[in-house]
Each structure stands twice: as C-alpha cells, then as structure tokens.
Image: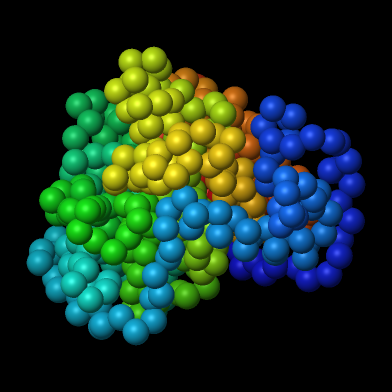
Amino acid sequence: MKKHLFIPGALLFGLLSLGGYGQQSGEGRALYLNSGSGQKKIPITTAKQLNQKRKQVLDSLQSAMGKLPPRKGNPPFDAKITETQNEPAYTRLTIVLTVAAHEQVSAYLYLPVSKDNRKRFPAMLALHETDDRGKRSPDGQGSRPDPEIRSNLAYAKELAERGYVVIAPDYPSFGDSKNYDFKADRYASGTMKAIFNHMRCIDYLLSRKEVDPERIGVIGHSLGGHNAMFAGAFDTRLKVVVASCGWTLFDFYNIGAGASQAYGGRLGPWAQDRYMPLLRDKYHLDPERIPFDFDEVIAAIAPRAFFSNSPVNDSNFDVKGVEKGMEAAKKVYSLLNDAGSLRLSTPVAGHDFPKSTREEAYRF
C-alpha cells in the first residue's frame, strides 16, 4: 500500500470549468465547497480547498449520523479470546474487545503464519455484508444459499492466506451483536456506532506488534462496502479502501415500488435504526436535503487509494450512479496528481464480488 499525504499549496484544476451543481448537471457535489452563505457553491480548484472539502464532508456526515465520540480516554481493550482455530496459513482468534465503557465488540482476528521470519504484516479491516452471521460472512461462513457467492465473500480469510493481519468485527445487530439495542446506546445512528467500532478496531491493530502501522486498509461488501467508505473518510490511517457493491449516488438508489412503500420512501432502507434514522427524521428522505452524497465520501478519502467493485447487474446499487460518482472523484484525484489511486471495476455480475474482481482488488 502506498502512503499518501495531502499536498499543500494551490494547484490549478482546469477540469472544473463546467457550470452547474449536483448529479443532474453531470458533475457532482465532490467538486464544490459550501460557501457558508446561502446556496452558493464554490468550484474546487486547489489542493488546499480539497482539504477544506474533507472537513465539510465529515461535518455533513455527522449531521446525518450524529457526532463521532472521542476515542481518547477509553478503558483498555481487555481483549478476551473465546476461540482459537489453527489453519496452515493463519491462526483465527475469536476475540471480544472493550471499545468504550460498557461497549464491547466481537471480532475474528486472523494472524498469518510467518514463512520468512517477518515480524510485521500489512493489515486489513474486513467488514461483512447484511448477514445475520456477521463476521462469519467474510470468512466464507455466511448465510447465502449459493455456495459460490458464500466463497466469493470470504475476503477476510483470503487476505489472511495472503499474509495480512485481518480483523473482522460484527456490525451492531449482527452476529454476536444480534440483540444490540439502538434505543439504549449513546449514538444517533447505527452507522456512527459502527464507525466508532471500526476506528477502535484500527486502534487495536496498531496496538499489536505484528502490524505494520503504515500498511492498513479496509475492505467490505454491500453493508460493509459503504461502511468501508465511511471508515476511510473519517480515519486517515487507512491507506486503501475497497468497497464492493456498497454505494451509488442517492439519485440512482431505487429498491422498487413495493420495498419503497414498505420503508416509507425510496431512500427508506438507509433510515433504519441500524443505519441512519436521521435521513428520515431530519431530512425526510429527500436527496436534495441529505447533506452528503457518495462522491463526496470518496473526495474525503482522496488521495488515498480507493477501489470500487460495482457490477453492472447490481439491482441494489445502480452502476450508472457509481459511474457518475467516479467521474467526479476522478477529477478530485487528478487535482492531487494521483488518478492512479482510483479504480472502478464493473464485472458482468449481480450483487456479488466475483473471484476475478477480488483478485484485481488484492493486486490493487
């Protein structure tokens, strides 16, 4: 993984001469700063402005998700090992981490077997899809009835076999956290609770002597895909973000009339308690009022490496919205002279992470 730093100074960016704002104009929110007065938008033309944009995006995300609590002053992790499984290429531990007072997270921790006396390994945070089995999904033990798809989602296991330290936590309300009570916690959304957990998982990785602190990334599918993006936006220690089937611009998200009615609107699934209820309660599921979009999340990740697996037949996350978002993101990365750190793969597949695309992501 390459180490990236934000580039200071003013770099002219001639790709933003087109007028308009928003997805319908063919550009995107990622390319503009909020002026702080009225609805005026300022085209981003310098790297300094992009740093300002990142701060604005994080503020906007917290407006939709609630505030990110401080990570300092929390009790020791007090990691408890509840199960050990030895494999030829790695040891998999089931651990329970104390991430804050009265808050625990269950996770799989994969420790690779050193074949060359290496003392430090790259590391990945592996986030699971919407699967009742939680962290078991990226180990290949998910609940998908199709065994091929189950194996396609075993990226935590595959990365461990490739020599990565991997931590794969349960998202709140899945796996060992299936009885999580969102009404009783201190978070405005399940998404922000997950972001906090995931950043604490990175803290934990950094506390381990096996982990190279300059080579840490995040990977996830579906639910794990957009949460990989959120973690990458907030946590600059993550040098690479891989999102599989996890996003499209809100204008392009459509789950069909029946499901829209069941969830109270086209964007209703995003507003469940386990995700971002403020999108309903505060922003009324109106994409024009929701304070962020996914091209902006990628802008907050820039110039660190970002890989999107977005199959052409994904009925959940329309590839057309992904392509538009990536068009805007490419201009952001070009501003930082780092367009090579952005990659989009569009396999002919459904809501899946095919083997060839996973291999491409691992090479990336």
Please report the residue visible at 69 percent of the width from the left and 27 percent of the height from the top: 24
Residue 131, image x, y percentages: 24, 39
Residue 171, image x, y percentages: 27, 52
The color scheme shown is rainbow
Please report the residue visible at 59 percent of the width from the left and 25 percent of the height from the top: 320
Residue 265, image x, y percentages: 40, 26
- The quadrant of the rendering that contains the N terminus is bottom right
Please report the residue visible at 83 percent of the width from the left and 69 percent of the height from the top: 9
Q: Nearer the viewer, residue 242 or 222?
A: 222
Residue 104 seen by the camera? yes
Instruction: State the count of labels.
Output: 0
Residue 303 vs 276, above or below: the answer is below
Q: Nearer the viewer, residue 253 or 59?
A: 59
Q: Nearer the viewer, residue 210 or 37?
A: 37
User: Where is residue 209, by image quadrant?
Assistant: bottom left
Looking at the image, the residue that sits furthest to the front is 38
Residue 260, image x, y percentages: 37, 22
